[in-house]
Amino acid sequence: MPVIEDILTRQAMPHSIDAEQAVLGSMLIDATCVKDVMDKLQPEDFYLRQNREIFETIYTMFSYSRPIDGLTVAEEMQKNGVYDPQTTRSYLAQLMEVTPTSANAMEYAAIVRDKALLRSVASAAGEITAMVQEGTGEARTTLEAAEQKIYAIRRGRSAQDMVHIGQVLTGVLDHLNELSSGQVGLPGLSTGLSAVDSKIHGLNKSDLILVAARPGMGKTSLALNFALNVGKACQKTVAVFSLEMSKEQLATRLLSAEAFVSNQKLITGNLSETDWVRIAQSANALNQTDIRIDDNPLLTVADMNAKCRRMENLGLVIIDYLQLMTSAGGRGYAGENRQQAVSDISRMLKIMAKELEVPVVCLSQLSRANEKREDKRPMLSDLRESGAIEQDADIVLFLYRDDYYNEDSEKRNIAECIVAKNRHGETGKVELKWLPDYTSFGTIEMRYGE
């Protein structure tokens, strides 16, 4: 029988002793269900110590492909020193008696897992309360640490079933059929720039897309190009997290690009009647989109993930920019520690893209290494704290404008979008028209009045 003291001391925590016993009994009377239960549960999911010890024993035996039944489990527990001569064997017999069939084993396992999740939440809540009562850190630090604890529980509980290749192929073939029949133009959302779309096949679900360049090359402008098109043409919600520019600055840029009114005019207010007509029309068009801006400079990935989860019809997330982000707890980093922080952040961004099933476009600064070379076009090694960022990103886009470095350049207002990494296809470069008055990009053949 279960130890009564164990029940009394842990009574307040969520649990289901009946479900735990039914899971263990199912595995003891029917070894064929063990593999299914192992995929769903871990030893720590069991509330009672005695049940946990039995499951750990079965877990180990399963790993070594040993036969599993009441007798073999009792012998293994005896070898491991977790056998009580007075209760263990009778308790194993009781488990098999109270479980007449293993048919509902997975339903029992789901209950055990659900109760374990609630206990994890309760435990995290206790730790958070202790942090608050200690009062050793700032409120912001405590809040971010609390969010990370909850986010860690969610990540740990988001395991998916392994899927047979046949099931995956069904979806792949259906998508191929749509593409070949012309029902779908691009696999992903259009960037609004046909040359970029043709190279990266649009902005695809679960992708982490890095846009990197030296300051002044137009990273933010390119990201806003993406946001405008996804918001207007694709009619999806776009979340823009700006850690550098204010909401008003971003809105002004979007208005300039949409209205084709000089950004300088919008800043100074020196506007003609024609400009006002364009601004009114463009403001109305922008108002019809669902582009949402957050300019809190202290956001963490957990903050962004939580906000995005509450958005319906989310199509794209933009973050400007990576090196300004803080890790959990809001601590500052320097040197190698900062590299580790950026590594953690980039990994969490990739996880976020997969969980939200939307493309995440993250902007990144480049080191000054390219400026020491004769050819100043960026390379992957120029990424600041580059190792993890390069590994986690599905697509890496560099921006380079020759006229930024050479006043007499033949390529005046021409930007190169260099695809340095592309998990979906080839690398290479495409040329875009840089429209400095509107801080925007267009295709080469595009004219100002279009």
Image: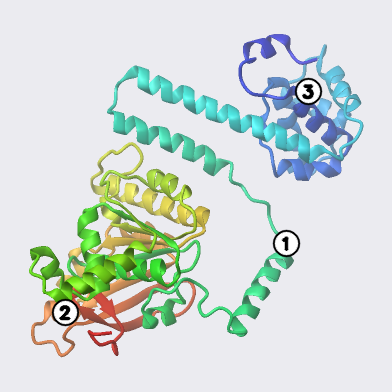
**Does residue 137 lie above or below 423 as drawn?**
above
Q: Is residue 36 visible?
A: yes
Q: Is residue 377 visible?
A: no
| Residue linked to disc 3 | 78
Residue type pointed to by label 3: Gln
Counting from the top left corner in percent of width and height, residue 176 is at 63, 78
Are the two marked residues, 1 and 3, in contact with CB atoms closer than 8 angstroms? no
Counting from the top left corner in percent of width and height, residue 86 is at 82, 11
Nearest to the observer: residue 34 or residue 413 = 413
Judged left or right of residue 164, residue 429 is left
The N terminus lies in quadrant: top right
Q: Secondary structure at mark 1?
A: loop
Residue type pointed to by label 2: Glu
Q: Secondary structure at mark 3?
A: helix
Q: Residue 374 — which label?
A: 2
Q: CA distance from mark 2 to mark 1?
A: 52 Å
Counting from the top left corner in percent of width and height, residue 93 is at 89, 23
* Rendered residue at 31%/66% (across/down): 284
Q: Residue 154 — which label?
A: none
Q: Residue 164 — which label?
A: 1
* Rendered residue at 23%/76% (across/down): 400
Q: CA distance from mark 1 to mark 3?
A: 39 Å
- Where residue 92 sits, quadrant-wise, is top right
Nearest to the observer: residue 271 or residue 219 = 271
